[in-house]
């Protein structure tokens, strides 16, 4: 698998939640983001799912 760099902008509340996850799990930021992406892609069945909140 090739390595990719992603850039994202998070709202303040999401950033705080992410920071809390990093602190609680002891994982690095990149690992937490990677796991969240994997969880998210498993829940996306149709492109329209990306527009749901």
Image (spheres, rainbow, N blue to C red):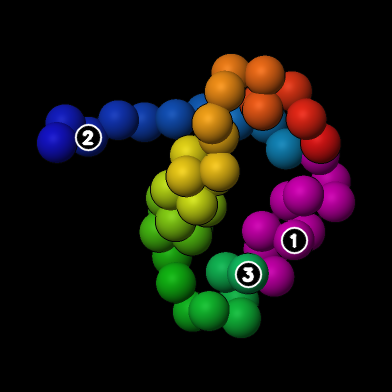
Report which residue position mark 3 lands on.
21
Q: Considering depth in this image, is 16 or 41 the residue closer to the camera?
A: 41
Seen at 50% across and 52% down, the residue is 39
Around disc 1, counting alpha carbons within 10 Å, would you say few (fewer than 14), some (14 to 19), or many (20 or more)?
few
Around disc 2, counting alpha carbons within 10 Å, would you say few (fewer than 14), some (14 to 19), or many (20 or more)?
few
Seen at 49% across and 60% down, the residue is 32
Farthest residue in the front direction? 45
Instruction: Verify CB contact (< 8 Å) between mark 3 and mark 2.
Output: no
Instruction: Verify CB contact (< 8 Å) between mark 1 and mark 3.
Output: yes
Q: Considering depth in this image, is 51 or 35 the residue closer to the camera?
A: 51
Judged left or right of residue 38, residue 22 is right
Report which residue position mark 2 lands on.
3
Query: Which quarter of the rendered picture does the C terminus lie within?
Result: top right
What predominant SS class does the magenta segment belong to? helix
Quarter residue 9 falls in: top right
Whether residue 13 is in magenta: the answer is yes
Which badge, 1 or 2, comes first in the chain's sequence? Answer: 2
Q: Which residues are magenta?
A: 11-20
Q: How many marks?
A: 3
Judged left or right of residue 52, residue 38 is left
Location of residue 53 with respect to 16 vertically, above or below: above
Residue 24 is situated, as x and y percent measured from the top left of the image, at: 61, 81
Query: Which quarter of the rendered picture does the N terminus lie within?
Result: top left
Report which residue position mark 1 lands on.
17
Q: Considering depth in this image, is 41 or 21 the residue closer to the camera?
A: 41
The secondary structure type at the circle numbered 1 is helix
Residue 16 is situated, as x and y percent measured from the top left of the image, at: 77, 59
Judge whether residue 33 can be spotted in this image: no
Instruction: Verify CB contact (< 8 Å) between mark 1 and mark 2.
Output: no
Location of residue 34 with respect to 48 vertically, above or below: below
Residue 29 is situated, as x and y percent measured from the top left of the image, at: 49, 58
């Amino acid at each position: 698998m090739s390595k990719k760099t992603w850039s994202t902008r998070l709202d303040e509340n999401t950033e705080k939640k992410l920071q809390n996850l990093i602190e609680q799990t002891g994982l690095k930021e990149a690992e937490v983001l990677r796991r969240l992406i994997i969880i998210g892609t498993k829940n996306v069945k149709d492109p329209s799912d990306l527009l749901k909140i």
